[in-house]
Image: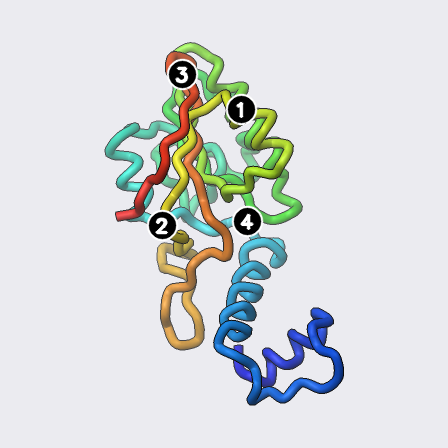
Amino acid sequence: MNRLQMKKWIQRKGNTENKVDAKSVSREEMHTGRKYRMDNVLLHTGKDDWETPEAFFRQLDQEFHFTLDPCSSHKNAKCKKYYTKEDDGLIKDWGGEVVFCNPPYSKMGNQDAWVERGWREAQKEGTVVVMLLPARTDTRRFHQYILGKAEIRFIRGRLAFELDGEPIRDKKGNPVSAPFPSMVVVWKSNIMPQLVGHFKEK
């Protein structure tokens, strides 16, 4: 985002009293603008195929050995067994699987339903559900289906999500981190809910 774009963004957001001198925009405001743009990318473009960073997924897979990705496409599936949007993983049986799920992040992606489904499916014998989610602890879904019902691993730092196997990058070619913190939620019928302070991305 250049200074002119930043000026227009500030004006749209109502953060100016009179006129804004583009040269006076601070580094902090520029950074805020980049975060706002990334938030638009992840949450307001209507796309829900932002991919889990491959290195981060491998770290989890070494621990859990996933067998099902119920929320994917043919291009970004993380497991041999997977369901696409057309299959509708929300209505499929996850029983007996070790599930990895990175649900949609857009407003139309119905993330509440995916979280509820993960919790319900994990009640089935021999089923483990691991979900990568924004760490939004003020939401109804967090208090109803996660807190006190799952192991929660808050991720230190911000993830750089991928598209078509490559990090989402800014105009300079640098990977762009998500504008929100993330957490890994683990539902498993035979473990006690617990909080794990941090889960560091390698």
Spatial CA distance of label 1 from label 3 is: 26 Å
Q: Position of residue 116 (x, y in %)?
A: 58, 26
Spatial CA distance of label 3 from label 2 is: 28 Å
Image quarter for residue 191? top left
Spatial CA distance of label 1 from label 2 is: 25 Å
Q: Is residue 17 above or below residue 111?
A: below
Q: Is residue 161 above or below residue 113?
A: below
Image quarter for residue 141? top right
Mark closer to the observer (3, 4)? 3
Mark 1: which secondary structure? loop
**Do we see residue 195 in this rendering?**
yes
Q: Residues within 10 Å of mark 3 (few under 14, many from 20)?
A: few
Q: Position of residue 9 (x, y in %)?
A: 65, 74
Q: Residue most toward the top?
A: 125
The mark found on residue 192 in the picture is: 3
The amino acid type, in three-letter code, at marker 4 is Asp
The amino acid type, in three-letter code, at marker 1 is Lys
